[in-house]
Every structure is written in structure tokens, then in C-alpha cells.
Image (cartoon, rainbow, N blue to C red):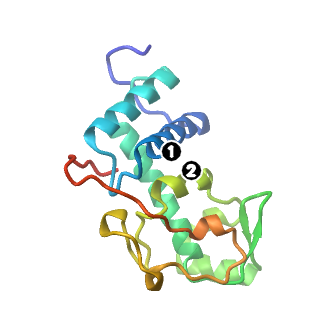
Amino acid sequence: MASKEKDSARWDRCTTKNLLEICVKEIQTSGKPGIGFKTRRWKVVVDEFNKRTNKNYNQKQLKNRLDFLRFDWTAWKQLLGKETRLEWNHETGTIVANDTWWEAKIKDNSKYARFRYQGLEFRKELEIIFGETVATSQRSWTPIMGVPSEDSAIKTNSTISEEIAEYGEEETNPDEDTSLW
């Protein structure tokens, strides 16, 4: 096990994947956290992460990584936001679109450029973790607001995989302390 002194956070693909797997497992075991993990659930995540990776990271370091990943996830969702009839390359996990479309999107928002040749890494895990708690320019909703009505559900004609555009029913426990991602 790592020493008692906090390690400097270094995030590679493997370390990030471990964090996401632990968060997904915690969500699958205990339910969607609403706006963020509660204090005692963070303890489970931190303890399991440190045990699995032999590191000594604290909650703030893990939360900072999740915040960074949420930034990418939000950009991805905004890029897809109102688009219909896009093609999807399942092998590469990327959007198939012509140069004109990409140039217009990147001109609109330069952060979309990172998705032109490679899709969002860990897309499935991020969907589970952030899928219904991310606000985009089109709509905002969190599980704490209750189940979305059919009018507020995502309606899309896109050929992009349905898992990108799913809402689910979630339960929250208002008696627990909250800690934002």
C-alpha cells in the first residue's frame, strides 16, 4: 500500500480507467448519486481506488479528475446536441462527417477539434457516471428533479448508437450529505 503521505496525482489511461470502473461499480451497487457522491460513498471510491492502484490519492484528486472528464463529456454531448442523421464509426468511436461539417463545428467551438479523429475515450463509462447530470445548451436535468417527462426526453433521428441518448429513472436519498463531483 502507498505511504500515508498524499501522492502527486498522475493520470494515465490505466489509472483513469480504474477510477471510472470503481465509480461505475459504486453507481451500479448503490444507485446514481444525483449531483455527486455522498461523503461515505466517496470514502468507498477513494479506498478502493488506492487499494487497486497502490496509490495514495485523496477525494479532491479523484474529484478533480472526474471534473476534467466531465468537461470532455459535456463538450462531446454539446457537439452531438442538436445533430441528426450523423453516421457513427463503431470501430473508432467517432462521428463520420465531411470536412465542411467539422470545420463549421470547430469554428463554433474549438474544443470540438479533439473529437474529429478520435471519439470520446471511456464514453460508455462516462455515460453511466454523467449521462443524466450534464447540462448542455439544449436542456438541463438531474435525477434529483425526478423522472423526465416524455416532452423533455431526448428525441433524435440520429443513427448514432442509442446509448448516447438514453435517460433512465434514478432514486436519490435526500437525507445524506452531498459532495459534488
Q: How packed is label 1: few (under 14 Cα within 10 Å), some, or many (20 or more)?
A: many
Q: Amino acid at mark 1?
A: Val
Q: Residue 96's image quarter? A: bottom right
Which of pointers 2 and 1 lies earlier in the amino acid sequence?
Answer: 1
Q: Residue at x 60, y 79 (%)?
A: 105
* Whether label 2 touches label 1, CB < 8 Å: yes
- Using the image, tell me which numbered label, if any, was put on residue 123: none
- Report x, y in % for residue 17: 57, 39
Q: Amino acid at mark 2?
A: Glu
- Report x, y in % for residue 31: 41, 49
- Report x, y in % for residue 165: 58, 70
Of residues 6 and 157, the one drawn nearer to the viewer in this rendering: 157
Please state if 116 lies on the left or on the right of 16 as rendered: right
CA–CA distance in space, label 2 to label 1: 7 Å
Looking at the rendered structure, the secondary structure element under dot 1 is helix
Q: How packed is label 2: few (under 14 Cα within 10 Å), some, or many (20 or more)?
A: some
Q: Residue at x 36, y 57 (%)?
A: 171
- Report x, y in % for residue 108: 54, 81
Say above or below: 77 vs 38.
Answer: below
Of residues 129 and 81, the one drawn nearer to the viewer in this rendering: 129
- Using the image, tell me which numbered label, if any, was put on residue 125: 2
Q: Residue at x 33, y 51 (%)?
A: 36
Q: Which residue is mark 1?
A: 24
Looking at the rendered structure, the secondary structure element under dot 2 is helix
Please state if 104 lies on the left or on the right of 78 as rendered: right
Please state if 85 lies on the left or on the right of 65 as rendered: right
**Image quarter of the N terminus:** top left
Q: Residue at x 61, y 82 (%)?
A: 156
Of residues 167 and 99, the one drawn nearer to the viewer in this rendering: 167
